[in-house]
Amino acid sequence: MRESGTLFLNNHEPSTSSLKTTLVNHSSHRALSESVLQHPRINQGMLNGLKVYVYELPSKYNTDWLSNKRCSNHLFASEVAIHNALMKSDVRTFDPSQADFFFVPVYVSCNFSTVNGFPAIGHARGLLSSAVELISRDLPFWNRSNGSDHVFVASHDYGACFHAMEDRAVADGIPEFMQNSIILQTFGVKYQHPCQKVDSVVIPPYISPESVESTLTKSPIDGQRDIFVFFRGKMEVHPKNVSGRFYSKRVRTEILRKYGNDARFYLKRHRYAGYQSEIVRSVFCLCPLGWAPWSPRLVESVALGCVPVIIADGIQLPFESTIPWSDISLTVREKDVAKLGKVLDNVASTNLSAIQRNLWDPKLRRALLFNDDVATGDATWEVLVALSKKLGRSHRRSRAADE
């Protein structure tokens, strides 16, 4: 897959002159561009005056992929959402000399397999490498810091290792050219891992805020919840051995085996487009690991008021400094899934009301959803807050401090 991806890049080699022209145009048309943008104002003071320059790369790196509507709407689509929001944000600067960080907008998750429909990311390293070559060839911003003030999104199973299978992800590691940069990635664990050996910010997977709003319009978050425990997704009766590994470490199989015939557990193995209507009716939503620890169910559960039951040992959750995860969710160790019934019965009879009261705070839903325009407190805002705490990497700030 990589060889074909490299061939594609070589056949569509971008010219640096187009990028340099864009740079000049940004500077000369700054006032016009900023007057055209219509977006809500955000509190700059809370971000320590953070400024981000967004590279305008040739369209083959990003917007060409949007011809497939799934590109901007699937679970990896934070790479699209963050780019769109930054383009219209107050933190965007059109003058690179005033930038603290440089955002590199490359969409690598929209090459959907014709076999299974899943994103194929074998081309990711080649596409990103080509983009870095482009921005570093004649422009000074990458080279002067070796990319340390540059920001990428890696919204895949194992983040910037760019592979869905952990053994392959670990073997390949993070591309060398990205190892000095800041990575916004969905993958995060609280122990040492090769796919985390980089300065990163753990972000939530993308869930459409419009779909959440539509669901809550029909079923309010504090409405009736007649499903005690909910899970819909892949659960293998006989898990396959894939390179010595089993999907979900057999956790989902054990859940199905133990609770498949338990009336309290609403477990479904097949896809259903209206599954959010099931989440909003549920008290507890299971969020077990798949191949990777994280899951979009985590965001959907919080957004729709269902208590997340996290079954993924050592997972690092998004925006932990903002979201009080221990007050709004439950954590069950992978080896204890056979005890789920007792654990949830106990919570239901003791502190469920307190957990739900915390969970139903609209600020938490806002913090996990990416919007078209950055709004104070939303997911892109939380990314900016995290970047504002890394201003020691800013070349502009360090230069001013030395003067």
Image (cartoon, rainbow, N blue to C red):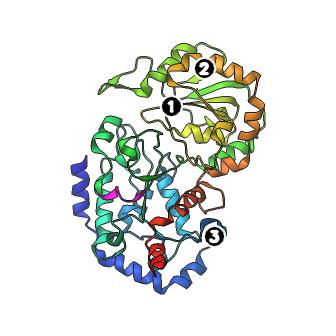
Residue bearing the label numbered 2: 340
Amino acid at the residue labelled 1: Ala
Which residue occupies the extreme front position in the image? Answer: 402
Of mark 3 and mark 1, the one earlier in the sequence is 3
Amino acid at circle 3: Gln
- For disc 1, the marked residue is 312
Residue at horizontal 52%, vertical 83%? 30
Three-letter code for the amino acid on which mark 2 is drawn: Leu
User: Is residue 383 found inside the magenta-colored segment of the image?
Assistant: no
Picture coordinates of residue 33 (x, y %)?
54, 80
Question: Tag 1 or tag 2, which sits nearer the N-term?
Answer: 1
Q: Quadrant of residue 230?
A: top right
Using the image as rendered, state which of residue 374 and residue 146 is in the foreground: 146
Residue that mark 3 sits on = 44
Looking at the image, which is closer to me, 275 or 196?
196
Q: Is residue 113 visible?
A: no
Q: Is mark 3 on a helix, strand or loop?
A: helix
Return the residue found at the far bottom. 28
Provide residue 379's location: percent of width, then percent of height: 59, 54
Distance between mark 3 and mark 1 Cα atoms: 36 Å
Q: Is residue 151 left or right of residue 36?
A: left
User: Is residue 138 visible in the rendered structure shown here?
Assistant: yes
User: In percent of the image, x 35 and y 79: which residue is there?
Assistant: 20
Q: What stretch is highlighted in magenta?
A: 177-182
Residue 161, numbered circle: none
Where is residue 250? Give x, y as percent: 44, 22
